[in-house]
Amino acid sequence: MDVNEFAVKFGAIVSEPGLSPETELSALDGWDSLGQVTFIAFARRQFGQVLNVEKMKSAKTVSDLYNLVSGG
Protein backbone atom coordinates (compact mmCIF):
# COMPACT_ATOMS: atom_id res chain seq x y z
CA MET A 1 0.00 0.00 0.00
CA ASP A 2 1.43 3.37 -0.97
CA VAL A 3 0.88 6.63 0.87
CA ASN A 4 -1.94 7.77 -1.43
CA GLU A 5 -3.92 4.56 -0.96
CA PHE A 6 -3.26 4.86 2.76
CA ALA A 7 -4.68 8.42 2.72
CA VAL A 8 -7.90 7.13 1.14
CA LYS A 9 -8.24 4.33 3.71
CA PHE A 10 -7.40 6.68 6.55
CA GLY A 11 -10.05 9.09 5.26
CA ALA A 12 -12.62 6.31 5.57
CA ILE A 13 -11.52 5.66 9.17
CA VAL A 14 -12.01 9.28 10.21
CA SER A 15 -15.01 9.91 7.90
CA GLU A 16 -13.10 12.55 5.94
CA PRO A 17 -13.02 11.76 2.20
CA GLY A 18 -10.47 13.30 -0.13
CA LEU A 19 -7.45 13.40 2.16
CA SER A 20 -3.93 13.75 0.85
CA PRO A 21 -0.67 12.71 2.49
CA GLU A 22 -0.08 16.36 3.42
CA THR A 23 -3.40 16.74 5.26
CA GLU A 24 -2.86 18.03 8.79
CA LEU A 25 -4.37 15.74 11.42
CA SER A 26 -5.32 18.73 13.59
CA ALA A 27 -7.72 19.87 10.85
CA LEU A 28 -9.75 16.65 10.98
CA ASP A 29 -12.87 16.49 13.13
CA GLY A 30 -12.73 12.70 12.93
CA TRP A 31 -9.24 12.51 14.45
CA ASP A 32 -10.64 12.22 17.95
CA SER A 33 -10.24 9.47 20.53
CA LEU A 34 -12.59 7.12 18.64
CA GLY A 35 -10.79 7.79 15.36
CA GLN A 36 -7.45 7.15 17.03
CA VAL A 37 -8.58 3.83 18.54
CA THR A 38 -10.01 2.79 15.18
CA PHE A 39 -6.72 3.71 13.52
CA ILE A 40 -4.76 1.65 16.05
CA ALA A 41 -6.91 -1.39 15.17
CA PHE A 42 -6.44 -0.68 11.44
CA ALA A 43 -2.66 -0.45 11.83
CA ARG A 44 -2.55 -3.78 13.60
CA ARG A 45 -4.82 -5.50 11.08
CA GLN A 46 -3.30 -4.04 7.89
CA PHE A 47 0.36 -3.66 8.86
CA GLY A 48 0.85 -5.93 11.87
CA GLN A 49 1.98 -2.90 13.85
CA VAL A 50 1.25 -2.30 17.51
CA LEU A 51 1.52 1.46 17.72
CA ASN A 52 3.20 3.40 20.45
CA VAL A 53 0.54 5.95 21.40
CA GLU A 54 3.11 8.66 22.12
CA LYS A 55 4.64 8.26 18.66
CA MET A 56 1.19 8.30 17.11
CA LYS A 57 0.35 11.52 18.95
CA SER A 58 3.53 13.12 17.59
CA ALA A 59 2.31 12.62 14.00
CA LYS A 60 1.23 15.87 12.35
CA THR A 61 0.11 14.70 8.90
CA VAL A 62 -1.44 11.67 7.23
CA SER A 63 2.00 10.96 5.77
CA ASP A 64 3.50 10.90 9.27
CA LEU A 65 1.01 8.19 10.27
CA TYR A 66 1.81 6.24 7.12
CA ASN A 67 5.52 6.37 7.96
CA LEU A 68 4.79 5.08 11.48
CA VAL A 69 2.91 2.02 10.28
CA SER A 70 4.86 1.26 7.13
CA GLY A 71 8.29 1.71 8.63
CA GLY A 72 9.02 4.44 6.07
Image (cartoon, helix red, strand yellow):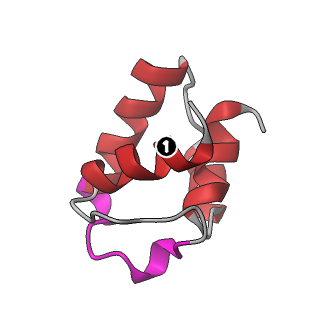
Amino acid type, callout 1: Phe
Q: Where is the C terminus found, in terms of image quarters?
A: top right
Residue 57 occupies quadrant: bottom right
Figure check: 42 above or below 32: above
What is the span of residues highlighted in magenta in the rendered image?
23-34
> Residue 64 location, x and y as percent?
66, 57
Residue 21 occupies quadrant:
bottom right
Question: Which of these two is toward me, 50 or 11?
Answer: 11
Can you see residue 54?
A: no
Q: Where is residue 20? Give x, y as percent.
A: 51, 65
Q: 29 or 57: nearer the eye?
A: 29
Q: Which residue is mark 1?
A: 6
Q: How many marks?
A: 1
Q: Is residue 48 above or below residue 52?
A: above
What's the residue at 62%, 70% (across, down)? 60
Q: Is residue 35 left or right of residue 58?
A: left
Residue 18 appears left or right of 26: left
Q: Callout 1: 10 Å neighbours few (<14), some, many (20+)?
A: some
* Residue at the image position 21 percent from the left and 60 percent from the top: 15
Magenta-span inclusion, residue 9: no
- Residue at (28%, 49%) from the top-left corner? 13
Say what secondary structure mark 1 lies in.
helix
Can you say whether 11 is above or below 41 in the image?
below
Q: Is residue 30 magenta?
A: yes
